[in-house]
Image: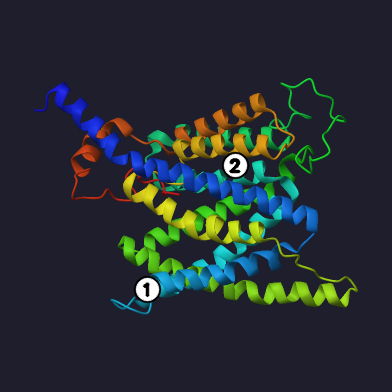
Amino acid sequence: MMSPKQISDDRGSSHFRHAPFQIIHVIGNFFRIWSVYSMYRYLNQTGAPVVLFLFCCLVPSSFVFLILQKPWKGRALSNQQIVPSLINGVITALYFILWGKGLKSCGPLRAILSEYSGAVLGVLSGVLYGRRGHVWKKVGGLVAMLVALFFLSQGWATSSLSPFSSKDSTDTKEGELLTEQALGLMGMMIPVVAGILSALRRVIARRVSLKNQQKKRLHAITITSATCFLFPLAMWDLVTGSSSGKAVELPFSAWAFLSTIVFGIILIFYVDNIAEERLHMVFSSPRHLMVAGACIIVMEIAYEMDFSLPGFIVCCLVLGFGIYEATSLERSKKDSSIKSEDEPNGILSNDFDTSPVLPI
């Protein structure tokens, strides 16, 4: 039996080992969110088509993933892995389309936080397939998430509409764009559905791949499949724009394109993979939300957006509480098993914290 001092030393050494991975996770998410804000400003200032912009970003990204992972080399992938990955590419393409549309209409703050609505998949799976004793806890978490999304839709995170701000809604800064509008729940549906699709593609990728290296190879196939699916849609934007007499332009902005490609698509995949494998942190988790929230605060201030810090904190706290309540099942019973599995030569299963809830 281990003494309390030995347990404390083990925890300290574990935190020290994970510190570099935590730093990588924070920096990677900061740059990803920075790329979202640059993409938002680019789309609104230039009026560029969302699908065409995303297609131009996915093309080089797919080439980079194929070059790095070389899915055609090594041990052959089975059809049971390739076919779901191709289908996952269609889901990924739909996610990018809806997320880009939601970003342009709702603003970066709402679009990013709406991605965490993917935890709804975990809640529903837990209600349908989990133990009945936890049903009300999961439903309560789901209600809290819906309340947080309602607050966001009403503009609680904006200084012009937040109940915590005395600022007049007509007194807006020149640089503020669409974030001061109250959208309502229906206006939030596009980024919310995009968040659910994002969670679904993560679940499929995790179920198909048996090993971490296979996951990376299959991801290259998924992104390539998504690029191929977006090609006819991007060409349709060009054709319809030309036939309507409007010149379809895609002005070049080095930072907007490069940041979306490098940080928003490529780097964030490896960062999230490190977070899952080393930090045991899935995307829709309170810890991940906390990191994203801190990065959003920095970007909102840097870009001089219509931002209310008290309202934003309330929305994040309610959303984080909902995610925690909906996805934390029998944590106390699993603590001992997690510690026994967390050895230097072993890696925890990706589903360690959400059984029977689907890990998002």
Determine if residue 139 is in view.
Answer: no
Mark number displayed over residue 80 = 1
Amino acid type at image mark 2 = Leu
**Residue at (74%, 27%) from the top-left corner?**
162
Q: Residue furthest left?
A: 1
| Of the pair 143 and 182, the residue shown nearer to us | 182
> Which residue is disc 2 drawn over?
113
Q: Quadrant of residue 183?
A: top right
Which is more N-terminal, label 1 or label 2? 1
Left or right of residue 159, residue 219 in this image: left
**Residue at (43%, 52%) from the top-left corner?**
271
Mark number displayed over residue 238 = none
Q: Quadrant of residue 287?
A: top left
Q: Position of residue 260 (x, y in %)?
A: 60, 58
User: Helix, strand, or loop for circle 2?
Assistant: helix
Neighbor class of circle 1 (other Cα within 10 Å; few <14, some 14-19, many 20+) is few
Q: Position of residue 298 (x, y in %)?
A: 60, 36
In the rendered image, the vertical position of residue 97 relative to residue 84, given as above or below = above
> So how many labels did they put on this image?
2
Left or right of residue 154, residue 1 in this image: left
Coloring scheme used: rainbow
| Of the pair 276 and 15, the residue shown nearer to us | 15
Q: Residue furthest front?
A: 254
Q: Residue furthest right?
A: 245
Q: Position of residue 354 (x, y in %)?
A: 37, 44
Determine if residue 83 is in view.
Answer: yes
Amino acid type at image mark 1 = Gln
Q: Quadrant of the N terminus?
A: top left
In the rendered image, the vertical position of residue 158 relative to residue 48, given as above or below = above
User: Helix, strand, or loop for circle 1?
Assistant: helix
